[in-house]
Amino acid sequence: MGTRFIHRCGLLAMIAASFLAAAPALAVAPLVNATLEPSQIALGESAQLTITSSGKGMESPKLPEVAGLEFHIVGQSQRIQLINGAALASSSIIVRITPQTAGVFTIPGLTPNSSPLVLRVAPAGSPALPGKSSGSGAPGMGSSANGIRMVADGAAFVRLILPKRDIYVGESVPLDIEVGLRDGFGRLNTLPTLVGGDFTLNNLSHQPEQAPRVIDGKSYMVLTWHSVVAAVKPGKFSLSVESPVTVRIRTRPQRDSMIDDMLGDPFMQNFFGATVTKDITATSTPSELTVLELPVEGRPPNFSGAVGSFKIAGDISSGAAAAGDPLTLRMHVAGSGNFDRVDSTMFEHLDQWKTYPPKSSFKASDALGLKGEKIFEQPLIASKPGTHTLPGLAFSYFDPGAHRYETVHSAPLKVTISPSLADGSLNAPQAPAGTASSAGPTATASSNTGLRPDHIATEAGTSSLAPPYLQPRFLAIPSLLALTIAGGWLGLRRRASDASNARGRERGSSKDINRALKDMESAARAGDAASFFNLARSALETGRGGENEDVRRLLALADEANYAALRPTHEEFETWLQFMRGRLS
Amino acid sequence: MNGRAPLAWLVIGFLCMACRIQAVAAEETGYSAAALYNSANAYARAGKPGLAVLNYERASLLAPADPDVNANLRFVRESSHVAAEPQRWSDRLVKLAPPAVVAWLGVAGVAMMGAGLLAGLLAPRRRRPRRLAMVAGAALVGFTLSNGLVLWPKLHEAVILSEATPARVSPVPMGDPLFVLPEAETVRITAEHDDFVLVRTRAGRAGWVSRANLAPVVPRR
């Protein structure tokens, strides 16, 4: 550390001494010189502008302003030269120029006497610029490695892999799209797109295959899409793929950036300011493809545009049915090719059968949908009983391998139709007797569609489709009825209960009276006046007796018997006993 | 006699109220079996099997025994390659009478049972006719309840109106599709969440379907 400090101090002292020694030379006017290298670059790359000034008044030159170019000082250096004993100091400023768009740019002279500089910027991914070799080492230039076009100084590449043969219009052929991104230098922005409007490309997956690959000693992550392309018209085409990517590109010419390669690690390179991030569109090398027209000669009338290799089979849902019952006839088309053009009307007309348009479904057996099976299902309804033979189905396609049309057939099918008792037969879509539709003037016959005719709308509408017994408003009726019945039942029950209680009380009172009369008879026989009149008074006090003269006299006699030892005669006892019987009954 | 007078007035009042409710219901304009059936026919002819099946299903709720409704419903389903509903023995119970008739039969059953109950207190000696009335009333109420039980699942069904409707794993538009429902398929609604309903097919598969792709057989108020 100390040695380095002494060395730096010595260097400064030498520079100061040189300035003093060169004092006469400082009187010379300053010279400014600017060089641009290279003068032709591709979009996404950078050029280097070196401004050297020497002589008196060395000041930082003002950077020019050019629309579409971005200037950025990346380094400065100073130098002292001794020429014929005179010391000449000069300084250099290194400026990185990064174009924002393609085109030809004129950088004005830095001094009034200096001439302007011209910078030509080509679109990204374009072929090598004239006068430059692909491996020239200019920053960010396209290069080719193993047949792959590199862009942005090898940060990324796009590759289109097509079959090496002519194809036919409408034929679906597999293709692979590869986008290679150098580890740490590139990032995919959106999905690649096919350049050329005369082809259709199946949707690309957002999750392509990813695999690392080493190309020219550099590690890449290669994203691969497997898809299918089809041509819409004949001719010779140049097909390519472009993909927007974000890459890190060098800021200095490659020959000056050996240290970058030595650093290797993108983080380290970024740390030292050797790269800059740019959004570019990478394009693949164009592939030539010849698209042939399908021959007119020998084209079958039922050809729907299917190109590939197919075979068919037919079956029916049931070999036996009743007239009027629907059956389903199926045609299985299996093989490989453009299944989106595989179509069939099956049977448009069959004697003694009603046919309906078929529906189809496709089940792919590979990820691209090139191989699989398409099933056509056609509803059929037999109108007459008997044994019917459905003729074999036919399907035509163009075989690109054999270069000719092919027609394949399925085997005929036998179906036994029994007489129908069902009301849904084809020729009997009649309304049942007695319904409004049978005689109404507004009823429309629609037997041709298999539907029964319309009805005459005469009934009143309802506010809800739910059954009335589930509607709260209607439920009020049985609820109130139940409440009424419950109330009535309770009322009647209570009335019956009261009557029963009254009868019970009546029965209990009679027993008491009889018992009292018997006791009074016993007391009369025994001549016990006190007991006799007390029993009589108790019986009268229960409410059975009214208040009159005899009662008052009997009560007085009761007191007299208790306190005055009254002794009535037998006749008097009998008289009062009769009186009590009369009162209590 | 004095005890029966309030009961008589109560019965008369009840009958007046029942008549009024029925009269108000008759004045309403809304769904009619014939109108629904005719709409369904129009949709079927226009190539809209989903709406056709929906209107046939609604018409069959009001007129379950109508052979035209059932025949056309079966026809449209077969034409659309949608499996027809399997016929159950309990379906005959529904077809015996329209729901409105069934509802009034239930009311009559309640009335007969109540009359039998009251007669036991008013005229306890006539035991046989009283028991007969109670058994008949209980049978009518049971018939109405059975009818409701059979119809209950249908009241929670819906018809797919869009072609190839996806049934998703979750009630969000970005939910992964589990399977695809064909137009005119009838499904059962088991749950609801925002703009999606959880449906279950006859095959037992369940998935969330957007409300825009189906319509319940009994519209919600």
Image (tube, grey):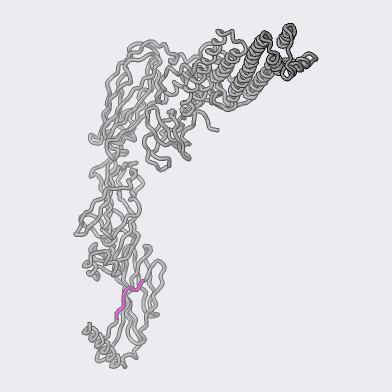
Relative to A373, B76 lies left or right: right
The percent position of residue A256, horizontal first and vertical second, equals: 24, 71
Residue situated in front as seen by the camera: A58 or B8? B8
For the stretch drawn in magenta, what is the main secondary structure? strand
Q: In which quarter of the image is the C terminus of chain A?
A: top right
In this picture, residue A45 sits left or right of residue B31: left
Decide: is A377 above or below B96: below
Q: Does the magenta stretch include residue A265?
A: no
Report the residue at 50% width, 24% height from top. Answer: B56
Residue A117 pos. (x, y %): 35, 72
Residue A76 in view here: yes
Residue A452 in view here: no
Q: Residue at x 31, y 33 (%)?
A: A363
Position of residue A162 relative to residue A218, above or below, is above
A560 in relation to A197, above or below: above
Image x and y of residue B45, in percent: 49, 25
Q: Residues in magenta? A: A72-77
- The N terminus of chain A sits in image quarter: bottom left
| Res. A200 image quadrant | top left
- Please name whichever residue, B203 or A557, is drawn nearer the observer in this view of the structure: A557
* Rendering coords of residue A543 (x, y %): 72, 17
Q: On screen, A198 above or below A23?
A: above
